Image (spheres, rainbow, N blue to C red):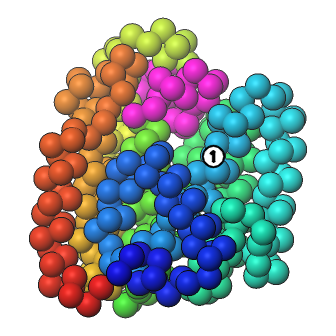
Amino acid sequence: MDELTAAGILDPDLRNSYSECKRLNALHGKTYYLATLLLPKSKRPFVHALYGFARYADEIVDELTSQLSIEERSLTLRSWSDTRMNDLEKGNSKDAIGRALTDTVKRFAIPIEYFRSFLNSMEMDLTVTRYQNFDELAEYVYGSAAVIGLQMAPILGVQNVRAYEGAKKLGIAFQLANFIRDIGEDLDRGRIYIPQDELREHGVSEEMLYCRILTPQIVSLLKFQIERVRTLQAQAEPTIFCLDKASQPCIRAASELYCGIVDEVERNGYDVFSHRASTSRYRRLKVAGRAWIQSLPYRFSW
């Protein structure tokens, strides 16, 4: 049985919409897509729908409108965002991505406010390039990452309310790991996600970052950031047991692969300027293989 049929998605237009979301996931979210394959077939399309929505919004900010001014990009994003939010409030959409998203939100009663917070963070990315402290950054990270975990939780199956707090922390850990890996790329976009007070505490100036020369101060700063990722991951780990058993292998694999980015930063000698840290294919296959074996007891019910 194919994924869409297993999920009870039979309407032709809806199937096309979910298929487009899956295509975006497979094309752009290789690690994310690999982890999704560890879920029961009946859950996968809904995860693809969330990814398709997030990916399209991100592309408006960073890629699709790169030749436009900040003001033009902001207007484009706001127009698209308003349409998607109206779709969610009405409960239907004519958009290729919006149709699957709206259906997913209705099926799992996902709070619409999560999507509003996400879109707010996407708009912040167009105008906010510095954060004075972690509390300021936390507003952005809540919308760009924590709510992704909260949106996912009902699809994965919540057996205990502790799952929601764990989903938030794991989402934040994923985002912070990406910030560490992408310091060089973000500099190219004029953005620095490391809080300004933490830069100062470790003796790092913006000039030092733009020189892209690894110094003891920058290494100290990166070690501090990496420790925060690992702390959040450790705090989230016990709450994975609060999800459906069939979903747990997938989330453990995602946790290891996404937070594992910081392991690769360490292996690269903390050089985030010359080398873009990525999880090796061997490690991805190893982690996925172990998770696939762990999921075997539930496969007959998929």
Q: Quadrant of residue 243?
A: bottom left
User: Vertically, is 117 above or below 298?
Assistant: above
- Determine the residue positioned at 57% across, 73% down: 15
Amino acid identity at mark 1: Asp
Element carrying mark 1: helix
The residue at the point 37 percent across, 90 percent down is: 159
**What residue is shown at x 14% (from left), y 60% (from top)?**
289
Is residue 95 highlighted in magenta? no
Disc 1 designates what residue? 58
Q: Residues within 10 Å of mark 1 (few under 14, many from 20)?
A: some
Residue 177 x, y percent position in the rendering? 39, 44
Decide: is 181 above or below 31: above
Q: Is residue 294 left or right of residue 84?
A: left
Boundaries of the magenta span: 181-205
Using the rendered image of the protein, determine whether residue 56 is visible from the camera's viewpoint: yes
Instruction: Tell me: residue 228, above or below residue 70.
Output: below
- From the image, which quarter does the C terminus lie in? bottom left
**139 to the left or right of 251:** right
Locate the N terminus and report the quarter of the image it occupies. Answer: bottom left
Judging depth in this view, the residue of 117 and 286 nearest the camera is 286
Compared with residue 121, is residue 85 higher up or lower down, i.e. above or below? below
Along the line of sight, the residue nearer the viewer: 29 or 278:
29
Determine if the magenta segment contains residue 182: yes
